[in-house]
Image (cartoon, grey):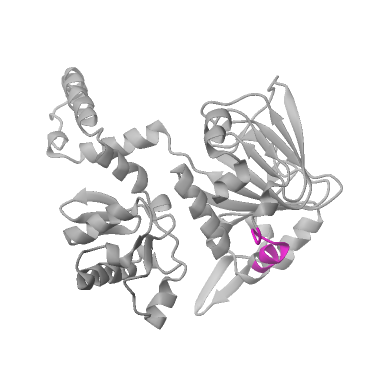
């Protein structure tokens, strides 16, 4: 059972019935994910991590509180910083009714980052996590809808979610809505509950008599516009579009009749590039998506434990190598030129783990391939 199926139940049913369409409430589902995130984790992140804005936001009654009310001057080594979150000021605002939002907290908690990468693999879209800590009787934001599909996990206390029966087709980030004129449904979340809210569904969130911590797992869906924009940018870098426009006072008038010609060239090139490898490169080549979970990478280098032919080897969770041909491989951090057999091994590992001894008929070659992939940070060995 994957993390996604634990949270949402049958994944195929979730895709067909709920994703992008309707809400899904699963009471107690997160209790099957032990050590997900704790109050102690949140306390440690907020008070002991020297967080900087805009990684932290604080809001109250529909308004975002200016950062200068909860940051202090600080020194990091020889550097003077003016955007470090002061935990005393932040907690004072919390006591006064404000909600604290910790952005991309998965980057600070390895076990939560691993969960996001696990979910990311099932969804095929980048995933990150934010934490919302709210005092009793708090409302951080007005009715709004998000540009992401979100999976809510109630960690501590309770929270009341009012979801409106409408989907905004092009929501944008945190779009505030008025005069909805739509019916709504109320969900009372308790510790361990899971709630899926589709992208573009308006909602209003409040606490009642208890404080609350909830985890928002954001599915940063790629749109058709994102895909076509990425493909178009690649095409426009070619020589066919590198020529200068005519010179003269009547440039616009002379160019206008020629636009159709170049639009046709662009359209034809898009159709030619609509092959799986090209689309794969655009979708999985983004920095936010293509970097795998790096936990354990330094430990492997430090201990330099030998790799055995019987060891399992797999791509790091969240690693989606993109192959550009001629032995070139692109990840979120750049492009590598690799021997053909190593690039081919990455292709094979997309289908799941293998034994190191299965990478090549020659034991010495199999160990060499495994060692290279581990040192590049693309793969990990062991259980």
Count of picture labels: 0
Residue 26 point in image, percent of width and height? 69, 40
Residue 235 image offset from top left, x and y in percent: 21, 37
Question: Quick check: 140 above or below 251?
Answer: below
**Magenta part of the chain:** 34-44
Residue 373 visible, this angle: no
Residue 239, image x, y percentages: 12, 39
Q: For the view shown, which residue lies furthest in the right direction?
A: 209
Q: Is residue 13 above or below residue 194?
A: above
Q: Residue extending furthest top? A: 257
Q: Residue at x 23, y 61 (%)?
A: 342
Q: Quick one: 178 or 15, which is closer to the camera?
A: 15
Q: Indicate whether residue 37 is drawn in magenta.
A: yes
* Nearest to the observer: residue 348 or residue 322: 348
Q: Residue at x 69, y 62 (%)?
A: 38
Answer with left or right where residue 190 lies relative to residue 296. right
């Amino acid at each position: 059972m994957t993390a996604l199926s634990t949270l949402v139940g049958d994944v195929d049913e979730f895709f067909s019935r709920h994703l992008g369409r309707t809400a899904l409430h699963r009471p107690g589902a997160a209790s099957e994910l032990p050590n997900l995130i704790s109050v102690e984790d949140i306390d440690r992140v907020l008070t002991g991590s020297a967080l900087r804005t805009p990684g932290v936001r604080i809001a109250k009654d529909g308004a975002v509180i200016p950062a200068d009310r909860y940051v202090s001057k600080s020194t990091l080594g020889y550097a003077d910083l003016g955007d470090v979150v002061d935990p005393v000021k932040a907690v004072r605002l919390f006591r006064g009714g404000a909600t604290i939002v910790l952005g991309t907290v998965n980057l600070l908690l390895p076990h939560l980052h691993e969960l996001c990468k696990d979910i990311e693999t099932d969804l095929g879209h980048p995933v990150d996590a934010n934490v919302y800590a709210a005092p009793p009787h708090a409302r951080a934001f007005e009715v709004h809808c998000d540009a992401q599909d979100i999976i809510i996990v109630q960690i501590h206390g309770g929270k009341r979610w009012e979801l409106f029966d409408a989907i905004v087709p092009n929501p944008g980030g945190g779009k505030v809505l008025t005069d909805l004129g739509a019916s709504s449904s109320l969900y009372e979340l308790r510790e361990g509950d899971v709630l899926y809210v589709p992208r573009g569904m308006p909602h209003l969130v409040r606490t009642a008599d208890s404080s609350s911590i909830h985890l928002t797992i954001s599915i940063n869906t790629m749109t058709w516009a994102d895909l076509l924009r990425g493909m178009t940018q690649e095409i426009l870098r070619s020589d066919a579009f590198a020529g200068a426009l005519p010179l003269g006072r009547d440039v616009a008038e002379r160019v206008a009749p020629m636009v159709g010609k170049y639009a046709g060239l662009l359209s034809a090139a898009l159709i030619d590039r609509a092959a799986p490898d090209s689309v794969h490169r655009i979708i999985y080549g983004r920095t936010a998506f293509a970097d795998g979970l790096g936990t354990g990478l330094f430990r492997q280098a430090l201990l330099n434990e030998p790799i055995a032919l019987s060891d399992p080897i797999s791509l790091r969770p969240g690693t989606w190598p993109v192959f550009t041909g001629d032995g070139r491989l692109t990840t979120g951090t750049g492009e590598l030129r690799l021997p053909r057999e190593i690039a081919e091994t990455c292709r094979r590992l997309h289908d799941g783990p293998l034994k190191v001894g299965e990478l090549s008929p020659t034991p010495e070659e199999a160990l060499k391939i495994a060692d290279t992939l581990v040192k590049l940070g693309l793969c990990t060995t062991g259980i």
